[in-house]
């Protein structure tokens, strides 16, 4: 629906919410008429969309007017079709029916300004909600409702939270997954490489080929089998010499790996992180002692 506001829309799904549709058009460019709730049950929210005089859009909405919500006796006699004169039933019935239809039209016309005011209020509420949810904070909170405190405190998961609304797009797409992971680790000063390799797994319940049209990959004998796994090699260079930082990093990556598996991997895919403990990049000087390979560079 990324269309200019002065263009007549096309191919609009008729189950769309009318407030969502009106948010794309300038105020005053649409005329709205209400056709009652019974129409919505049959034709959804938007019943008809057509161009009216002056180039404006005419939207017929299957919603109840305030008229439809008030007692019928306020507008129509409830015994209108009772005790019709003998021999004139058809003529009197038709006349009373036409009178009732005129009363309906007048009632809808009378309540139209109030109906439109209520519609504008709902539209304002939706626009404010859109501003609040512009960063997808609402969806992030919904999707991440069951994330544990340990996961929330993980520095890599914190940087992954903005990607949660796109997990459906990323799941099963190795390119998108790799781009996301590279961005997350790059912000922490780390680099990763994608490796395609087979990993051996052990299963206490061996699988056997139980149908004739199965593939040979679906069967293995014993409890050890090989499976292709999406593996990322993380290049890590610790600053400490006792290894505590490295052990803490391994724990962080393990928690992050389980999180990525739950939200961004297909049900038949497995992700794995291998950590390469590399040496720190060579620096010409350390800005403090001006040393390079134990030689003083302070001239």
Image: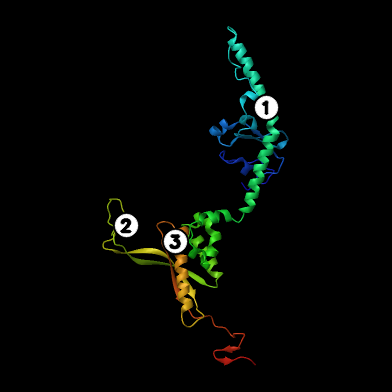
Report the front residue among 27 and 169: 27
Above or below, 109 against 169 in this view is above
Q: Provide the secondary structure element on which disc 2 rests.
A: helix
The residue under label 3 is: 261
Residue 36 sits in quarter: top right
Mark linked to residue 247: none
**Residue 57 showing in the rendered view:** no
Q: Quadrant of the C terminus?
A: bottom right
Residue 11 sits in quarter: top right
The residue under label 1 is: 107
Above or below, 197 against 11 in this view is below
How many C-alpha atoms fall within 10 Å of the one at disc 3: few (<14), some, or many (≥20)?
A: some
Work out whether mark 1 precedes mark 3 in sequence or the reverse, and give the earlier one.
1
Residue 90 sits in quarter: top right
Q: Residue at x 44, y 63 (%)?
A: 258
Point out the frontmost of discs 1 and 2. Answer: 1
């Amino acid at each position: 629906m990324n269309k200019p506001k002065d263009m007549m829309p096309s191919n609009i799904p008729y189950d769309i919410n009318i407030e969502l549709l009106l948010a794309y058009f300038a105020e005053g460019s649409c005329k709205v008429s209400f056709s009652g709730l019974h129409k919505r049950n049959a034709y959804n929210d938007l019943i008809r969309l057509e161009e009216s005089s002056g180039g404006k859009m005419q939207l017929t909405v299957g919603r109840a007017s305030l008229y439809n919500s008030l007692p019928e006796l306020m507008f129509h006699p409830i015994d209108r079709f009772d005790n019709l004169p003998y021999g004139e039933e058809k003529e009197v019935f038709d006349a009373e029916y036409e009178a009732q239809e005129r009363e309906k039209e007048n009632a809808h016309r009378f309540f139209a300004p109030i109906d439109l005011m209520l519609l504008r209020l709902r539209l304002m509420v939706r626009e404010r909600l859109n501003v609040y949810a512009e960063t997808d904070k609402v969806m992030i909170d919904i999707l991440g409702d069951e994330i544990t405190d340990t996961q929330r405190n993980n520095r890599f998961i914190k940087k992954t939270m903005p990607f949660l609304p796109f997990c459906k797009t990323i799941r099963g797409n190795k390119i998108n997954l790799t781009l996301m992971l590279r961005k997350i680790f790059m912000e922490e000063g780390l680099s990763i490489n994608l490796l395609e390799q087979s990993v051996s797994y052990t299963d206490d319940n061996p699988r056997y080929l139980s149908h004739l049209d199965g593939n040979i990959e679906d069967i293995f004998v014993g409890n050890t089998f090989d499976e292709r796994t999406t593996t990322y090699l993380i290049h890590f260079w610790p600053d400490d010499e006792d290894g505590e930082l490295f052990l803490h990093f391994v724990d962080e990556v393990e928690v992050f790996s389980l999180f990525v598996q739950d939200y961004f991997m297909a049900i038949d895919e497995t992700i794995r992180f291998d950590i390469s403990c590399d040496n720190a990049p060579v620096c010409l000087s350390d800005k403090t002692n001006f040393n390079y390979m134990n030689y003083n560079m302070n001239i």
